[in-house]
Image: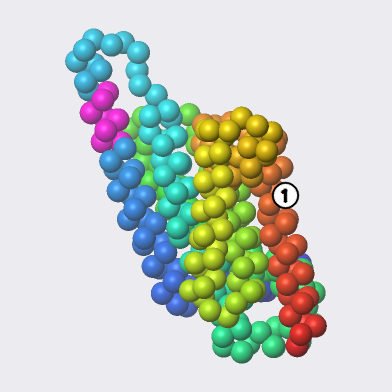
């Protein structure tokens, strides 16, 4: 485990030693902050109109604000996460340090886990910005904290899946732009697979829709933790990291 945490720490330092971390956190903070402001402003406006019309049933903050914010956050991450994973192995190949990594006394799975965990730490730093924004709701209201915690759990699972796929793709090229583009394309495809269920009720259509990362995030955004969604994300993360390990093994043989 010490080797894993050493690699993880090295990756985290490399993110914050370059403009990447600050750029990603700034972009996420600006975009999510604008969405947070717009959503809460609309909620306040609708609440005032509801009171003026004499409606006694209060509007739910969780339903009208938080659920939509988590959906927006998942879309933002779809665009930004490839920028986190693109450099994991592609940069090592470009700079020539991949040879030192391959000849080091480390197991392939240790390298994989260390790199992936480093990327996860960077991702969690982005998510903390969303947590800071949403925490402001508790200053002026009483939202239910359990759906919020579930939504963040869903973001972590989805982010871990996208990063696992991106880590594998990063082992296939030494060009970071290619790695980012390929990761984004792959994850966008996994995102839109859920559209199949809208026009096809056959068994194969349900199977295709089941493979969508969007299908399994929606219950989390509503505050629902379903075992099948947890199993899907855990399996997808394992598959991505397994393929990464096999790719590293292949690089050792070629070296």
Q: Would you place residue 112 above or below residue 47 in this image?
A: below
Numbered circles on residues, count: 1
User: How are the residues colored?
Assistant: rainbow
Of residues 226 and 106, the one nearer the viewer is 226
Q: Is residue 35 visible?
A: yes
Find residue 11 and report its image quarter: bottom right
> Does the stretch in magenta take in 20?
no
Vertically, is 77 above or below 218? Answer: below
Residue 57 located left or right of residue 205: left
Instruction: Please determine whether, in this image, residue 112 is positioned above or below residue 189.
Output: below
Name the foreground residue: 60 vs 171.
171
**Dot 1, crowdedness within 10 Å: few (<14), some or many (≥20)?**
few
Say which quadrant the C terminus sits in. bottom right
Left or right: where 74 falls relative to 57 = right
Q: Position of residue 158 (x, y in %)?
A: 58, 49
Quadrant of image for the N terminus: bottom right
Q: x, y (%) of residue 55?
A: 28, 11
Question: Where residue 233 appears, x then y in whole percent?
Answer: 66, 47
Residue 84 visible in image: no
Q: Main secondary structure of the magenta part?
A: helix
Tell which of 169 and 209 is nearer to you: 209
Q: Which range of residues does the magenta coloring cover? A: 40-47
**Residue 115, x across and y down, in percent:** 64, 69
Secondary element type, mark 1: helix
Q: Answer left or right for 246 relative to 33.
A: right
Residue at left 54%, top 74%?
Answer: 87
Task: Tell me which residue sits at (41%, 40%) in the image.
Answer: 69
Q: Which residue is mark 1?
A: 235
Which residue is pictured at 65% across the width and 67% down the height?
Answer: 168
Image height of 77 relative to 116, above or below: above
Residue at 48%, 29% in the rendered image: 144
Q: In terms of image quadrants, where is residue 110?
A: bottom right
């Amino acid at each position: 485990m010490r080797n894993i945490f050493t690699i993880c720490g090295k990756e985290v330092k490399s993110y914050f030693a370059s403009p990447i971390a600050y750029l990603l956190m700034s972009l996420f903070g600006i975009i999510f902050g604008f969405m947070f402001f717009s959503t809460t402003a609309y909620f306040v406006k609708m609440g005032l109109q509801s009171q003026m019309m004499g409606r006694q049933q209060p509007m739910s903050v969780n339903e009208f604000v938080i659920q939509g914010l988590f959906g927006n956050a998942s879309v933002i991450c779809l665009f930004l996460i490839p920028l986190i994973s693109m450099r994991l192995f592609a940069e090592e190949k470009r700079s020539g340090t991949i040879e030192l990594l391959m000849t080091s006394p480390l197991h392939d799975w240790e390298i994989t886990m260390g790199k992936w965990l480093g990327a996860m730490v960077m991702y969690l730093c982005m998510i903390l910005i969303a947590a800071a924004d949403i925490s402001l709701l508790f200053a002026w209201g009483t939202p239910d904290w359990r759906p919020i915690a579930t939504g963040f759990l869903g973001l972590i699972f989805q982010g871990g899946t996208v990063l696992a796929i991106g880590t594998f793709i990063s082992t296939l090229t030494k060009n970071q732009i290619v790695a980012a583009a390929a990761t984004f394309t792959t994850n966008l495809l996994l995102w839109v697979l859920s559209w199949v269920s809208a026009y096809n009720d056959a068994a194969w259509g349900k199977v295709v829709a089941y493979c969508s990362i969007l299908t399994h995030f929606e219950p989390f955004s509503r505050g629902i933790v379903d075992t099948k969604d947890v199993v899907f994300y855990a399996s997808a993360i394992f598959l991505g990291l397994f393929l990464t390990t096999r790719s590293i093994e292949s690089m050792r043989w070629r070296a």
